[in-house]
Image (cartoon, rainbow, N blue to C red):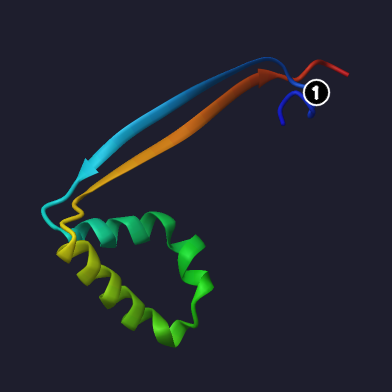
């Protein structure tokens, strides 16, 4: 994508880390605050409380308390025109 845009000297770096929470509810709440714009737009607003509760309970029941996150950084140079 960067090469097609005309960038040169392209480098990438991946950062990965884990966030650990005291319980599944807190892990789920954090997860949704960092991705809420994406997932909450898929549901009717009136359904969100029910969906949130059901998913919090799932995280708690399955003992999901750690979330792994990663990002990819891309660096490059755009040649002078």
- Left or right of 12, for residue 69: left
Count of residue discs: 1
To which quarter of the image does residue 23 belong?
Answer: bottom left
Residue 77 in percent (x, y) is at 70, 17
Task: Report if residue 44 is visible in the image.
Answer: yes
Residue to which mark 1 is pinned: 6
Give the answer, above or below, for where 68 lies relative to 26: above
Quarter that holds the N terminus: top right
Q: Residue at x 45, y 26 (%)?
A: 14
Task: Report if residue 25 is visible in the image.
Answer: no
Give the answer, above or below, for where 20 lies relative to 52: above
Query: Is disc 1 placed on a helix, strand or loop?
Result: loop
Q: Residue at x 49, y 82 (%)?
A: 44
Dot 1: within a 10 Å radius of its alpha carbon, few (fewer than 14), some, or many (20 or more) residues?
A: few
Residue 15 in percent (x, y) is at 40, 28
Give the answer, above or below, for where 20 lies relative to 59: above
- Left or right of 71, for residue 10: right
Which residue reaches farthest left?
22
Residue 51 in percent (x, y) is at 35, 77
Residue 79 in percent (x, y) is at 80, 16
Give the answer, above or below, for where 29 lies relative to 11: below
Which residue reaches farthest front?
62
Quarter that holds the C terminus: top right
Q: In the image shown, does 33 or 14 lie closer to the viewer?
A: 14
Which residue reaches farthest top?
9
Which residue reaches farthest right?
81
- Left or right of 34, for residue 19: left
């Amino acid at each position: 994508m960067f090469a097609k845009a005309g960038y040169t000297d392209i480098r990438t770096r991946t950062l990965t880390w884990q966030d650990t929470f005291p319980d599944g509810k807190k892990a789920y709440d954090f997860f949704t605050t960092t991705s809420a714009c994406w997932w909450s737009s898929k549901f009717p607003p009136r359904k969100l409380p029910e969906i949130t509760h059901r998913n919090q309970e799932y995280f708690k029941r399955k003992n999901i308390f750690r979330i792994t996150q990663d990002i990819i950084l891309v660096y490059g140079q755009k040649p002078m025109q």
